[in-house]
Image: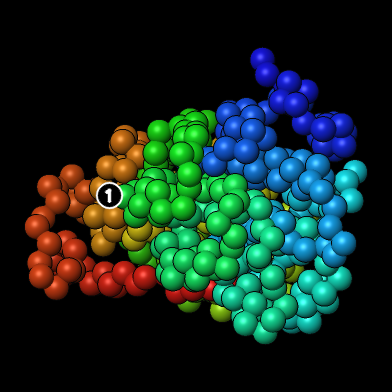
């Protein structure tokens, strides 16, 4: 079995890995690191929880530490991330892996005071981890110089496109030097991502550790059919009767997340909530309480589906099924991390059966049904068994008679 010692990483990085109790690289790391150390471009397709950050952070740190020192410290690596939470986690990883090096980095994202970020840039940094919006803003103010970047990473590329960042990405890339090493990571590889990769990667090594849009094998998946108004009762029943450690509860909307949070607090559960309307300080506080085990539950919208890295998460609850089936894969990837097993439980009401069919199509398997619970709704189960109807011109999906209409899906708003 390959060890990190076999990957020709420099001694300070090996020392940091040992301090973190890392001995064997994951598949994505074992395949990506040698190519990146050789200076090759890489396009990686891998699910969340597979160790992608170390796969690019370690080569970046090694390249920078071995590069010719310049009189003035300037950014030599740029990592773009779709969300604040993910950017912060990437920054923490660089700090951890580079603890025995003299590299400096800054994490740049919106929603917080820009002055500390500007001060850090003025001091000089080797690595910038950023969300696109704030990076462009500080660049327009003259605080960001990308002309010396030799290593460019586009992380979670599919999420970037979903959030409407493609124009910003192209704008940023125009500021980068033509000669550089590139890496693109994406959990899925639709045609739009393939086209983006082909536009700037030079004869890349392709690394794929799992089939596209597949779900992690160690995650147990279940779906329960329930009336919309009974979902809170079903959730609390499971939390009271099952062995649930730490769990994330996903809703489709911010308003829905707030409602679920309020009900859980009223029932005596320790819970936090994060979504796009929360300030960055509130989001950081909620995530810290969850990571530290002070709160058992985190209620979140899809903004957090790829931005939470907590190894001890035992369950993911899809309180609302996502209207974008790709997000199902990213949501349940929050559990079953670092080789652990995990459980995903989805609630499906009579208006969500179309979403369920889309999810099962993209993961290539049927999710087992659980019907022996007090809140079972036979109408929703029967609706799921019906053939998918042809969509009308209005774009409104199928809904059984006497059911409330499904809200039209809304495209994710940029939040960074």
User: Where is residue 300 shown, x and y percent of the image?
Assistant: 55, 63
Give residue 70's quadrant in the image. bottom right
**Residue depicted at 48% across the width and 61% down the height:** 160
Say above or below: 268 vs 326. below
Q: Quadrant of the N terminus?
A: top right
Say above or below: 139 vs 261. below
Q: Which residue is mark 1?
A: 358
User: Please, which colouring scheme is shown?
Assistant: rainbow
User: Where is residue 380 shown, x and y percent of the image?
Assistant: 25, 53
- Is there any visible trace of residue 346 in the rendered image? no
Left or right of 63? Residue 372 is left
User: Where is residue 152 shown, x and y percent of the image?
Assistant: 60, 54
**Toward the viewer: 290 or 124?**
124
Number of dots carrying numbers: 1
**Residue depicted at 46% across the width and 58% down the height:** 159
Left or right of 19? Residue 86 is left
**Residue depicted at 64% across the width and 77% down the height:** 139
Say above or below: 83 vs 10. below
**Toward the viewer: 211 or 30?**
30
Left or right of 259? Residue 32 is right
Crowd around label 1: few <14 · some 14–19 · many ≥20 (10 Å): some
Q: Quadrant of the C terminus?
A: bottom right
């Amino acid at each position: 079995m390959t060890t990190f010692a076999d990957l020709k990483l420099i001694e300070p990085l090996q020392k940091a890995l040992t301090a973190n109790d890392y001995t064997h690289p994951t598949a994505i790391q074992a395949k990506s690191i040698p190519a990146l150390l050789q200076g090759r471009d890489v396009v990686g397709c891998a699910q969340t929880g597979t160790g992608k950050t170390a796969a690019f952070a370690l080569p970046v740190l090694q390249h920078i530490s071995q590069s010719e020192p310049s009189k003035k410290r300037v950014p030599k690596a740029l990592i773009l991330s779709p969300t604040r939470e993910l950017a912060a986690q990437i920054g923490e990883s660089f700090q951890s892996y580079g603890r025995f090096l003299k590299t400096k980095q800054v994490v740049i994202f919106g929603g917080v005071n820009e002055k500390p970020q500007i001060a850090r840039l003025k001091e000089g940094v080797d690595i910038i981890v950023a969300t696109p919006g704030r990076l462009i803003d500080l660049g327009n103010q003259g605080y960001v110089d990308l002309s010396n970047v030799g290593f460019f990473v586009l992380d979670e590329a599919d999420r970037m496109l979903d959030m409407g960042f493609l124009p910003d990405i192209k704008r940023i890339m125009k500021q980068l030097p033509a000669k550089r090493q590139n890496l693109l990571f994406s959990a899925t590889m639709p045609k739009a991502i393939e086209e983006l990769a082909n536009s700037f990667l030079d004869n890349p090594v392709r690394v794929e550790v799992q089939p596209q849009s597949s779900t992690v094998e160690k995650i147990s998946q279940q779906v329960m059919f329930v009336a919309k108004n009974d979902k809170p009762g079903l959730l609390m029943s499971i939390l009271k009767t099952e062995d649930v450690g730490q769990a994330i509860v996903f809703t489709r909307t911010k308003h829905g997340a707030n409602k679920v949070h309020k009900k859980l607090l009223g029932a005596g559960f320790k819970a936090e909530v994060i979504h796009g309307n929360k300030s960055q300080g509130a989001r950081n506080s909620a995530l810290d309480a969850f990571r530290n085990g002070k709160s058992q539950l985190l209620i979140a919208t899809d903004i957090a589906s790829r931005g939470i890295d907590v190894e001890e998460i035992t369950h993911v609850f899809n309180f609302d099924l996502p209207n974008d089936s790709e997000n199902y894969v990213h949501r349940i990837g929050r559990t079953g991390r670092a080789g652990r097993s995990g459980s995903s439980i989805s609630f499906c009401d009579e208006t969500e059966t179309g979403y369920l069919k889309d999810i099962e199509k993209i993961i290539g398997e049927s999710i087992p049904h659980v019907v022996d619970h007090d809140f079972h709704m036979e109408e929703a189960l029967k609706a799921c068994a019906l053939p998918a109807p042809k969509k009308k011109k209005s774009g409104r999906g199928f809904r059984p008679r006497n059911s409330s209409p499904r809200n039209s899906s809304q495209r994710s708003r940029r939040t960074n």
